[in-house]
């Protein structure tokens, strides 16, 4: 440039660095701003803070936040969102509490949604309830669809379906996300018949279903053993609503057949799929074989799996376990040897339980 860049120039460059994930270049721009700064500029400082959070450098983002001479709601929301999106959910909630107690800025809709997302990720029901209590005192939040949807999702993910339904019923405006979230929540909790009722009610309200809605419907039919109804929904999705099935929908149908013990139909369905089966599809079929003890199907599908290169770690782990359950130890050991040769190792499962003192 043949002129001196100003703060707006630097904000534009930092936005580009954020989009590219160019951490080194963004740091250079930050350094330039420090050397040529004529005072505090909250817009530029927020752009630097946003750059560090988007690049995943939360350490420098934290340093930037602490050293800012002036902070606004965007500053607080940016760092809270960065913590939440990177899995540091306790830090996100702690920062929100600090924001409320300090009174430096009032949280906005994005702040609340980021927080509820953090609670959903770690199953922090008590913290989610505390946030719900806070926004209940702010009527401008409760009536808002985005915050309401985030609340429904938080309660669903934390296992409090009763409160999820209560929030859903209280929403002034229900959109496709509201209906889809509560539908999938009902499906995950095993309320198959309630899901079908919700779907009918959704249509009565004039809300057209989307692909997520049908994942909830198919999952509900799978868990409730409603094979005929599930196939009806799968066909209606394609023929009536013009929604092209994705691999997740095919996996739901395979799981539905498998849970009902219709393994032959499940295998035939996989072979007739117009798209390539992924690990979710094979995992559903293999899990059904394990549950129902169909050793012959393993012989028929083993060659489809090849060396397992396209399968998830969890799906690969099903193979040796299934072989071992039928005393086929040689095959189980062979698959485990292949996994070791491929450098594949299943991560140990972990659970998060919130406790109160």
Image (cartoon, rainbow, N blue to C red):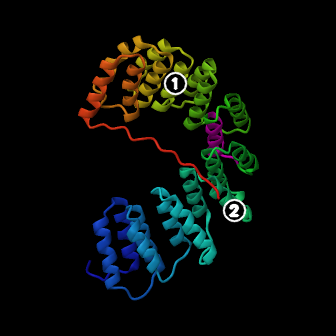
Q: Quadrant of residue 142?
A: bottom right
What number is the disc on residue 255? 1
* Identity of the residue drawn at 63% across and 58% down: 127
| Residue indicated by mark 2 | 135
Residue 178 magenta? yes
Q: Quadrant of residue 54?
A: bottom left
Q: Quadrant of residue 302?
A: top left
Task: Mark 1: give few (<14), some (14-19) or many (20+) Cα within 10 Å.
Answer: many
What number is the disc on residue 69? none
Query: Does 286 sit above or below residue 150?
Result: above
Query: Does 147 sit above or below residue 14?
Result: above
Query: Does 130 sit above or below residue 346?
Result: below
Q: Report the magenta residues as a range.
A: 174-187
Image location (x, y in percent) of residue 241? 59, 30
Q: Say whether residue 257 is left or right of residue 31.
A: right
Q: Say whether residue 288 is left or right of residue 217.
A: left
* Identity of the residue drawn at 37% across and 34% down: 312
Q: Say whether residue 279 is left or right of residue 226.
A: left
Q: Under tag 1, what secondary structure?
A: helix
Work out which quarter of the rendered image holds the C terminus and state it. bottom right
Query: In terms of sequence position, does the residue under pointer 1 or pointer 2 come before the other?
Result: 2
Work out which quarter of the rendered image holds the N terminus and state it. bottom left
Q: Under tag 2, what secondary structure?
A: helix
């Amino acid at each position: 440039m043949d002129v001196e860049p100003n703060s707006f120039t630097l904000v534009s460059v930092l936005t580009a660095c954020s989009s590219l994930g160019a951490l080194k270049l963004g740091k250079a721009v930050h350094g330039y701003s420090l050397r040529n700064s004529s005072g505090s500029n909250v817009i530029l400082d927020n752009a630097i803070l946003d750059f560090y959070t988007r690049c995943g450098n939360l350490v420098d983002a934290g340093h930037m936040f602490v050293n800012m001479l002036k902070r606004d709601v965007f500053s607080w929301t940016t760092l809270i969102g960065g913590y939440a999106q990177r899995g540091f959910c306790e830090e996100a909630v702690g920062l929100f509490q600090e924001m409320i107690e300090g009174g430096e800025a009032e949280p906005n809709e994005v702040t609340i949604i980021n927080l509820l997302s953090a609670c959903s990720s770690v199953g922090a029901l008590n913290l989610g309830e505390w946030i719900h209590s806070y926004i209940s005192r702010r009527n401008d939040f409760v009536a808002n669809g985005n915050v309401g949807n985030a609340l429904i999702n938080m309660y669903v993910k934390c296992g409090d379906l009763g409160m999820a339904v209560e929030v859903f019923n209280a929403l002034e405006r229900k959109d496709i996300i509201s209906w889809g979230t509560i539908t999938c929540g009902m499906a995950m909790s095993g309320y198959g018949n309630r899901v079908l009722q919700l779907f009918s009610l959704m249509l009565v309200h004039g809300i057209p279903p989307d692909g997520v809605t049908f994942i909830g419907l198919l999952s509900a039919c799978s868990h409730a053993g409603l094979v005929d109804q599930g196939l009806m929904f799968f066909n209606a999705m394609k023929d009536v609503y013009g929604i092209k099935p994705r691999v997740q929908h095919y996996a739901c149908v395979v799981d539905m057949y498998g849970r009902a013990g219709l393994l032959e139909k499940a295998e035939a369905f996989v072979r007739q799929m117009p798209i390539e089966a992924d690990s979710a599809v094979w995992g559903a079929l293999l899990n059904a074989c394990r549950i129902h003890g169909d050793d012959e199907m393993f012989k028929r599908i083993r060659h489809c799996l090849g060396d397992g290169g396209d399968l998830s770690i969890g799906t690969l782990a099903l193979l040796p376990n299934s072989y071992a359950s039928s005393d086929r130890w040689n095959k189980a050991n062979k698959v485990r040897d292949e996994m070791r040769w491929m450098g594949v190792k299943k991560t140990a499962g972990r659970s998060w339980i919130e406790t109160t003192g």
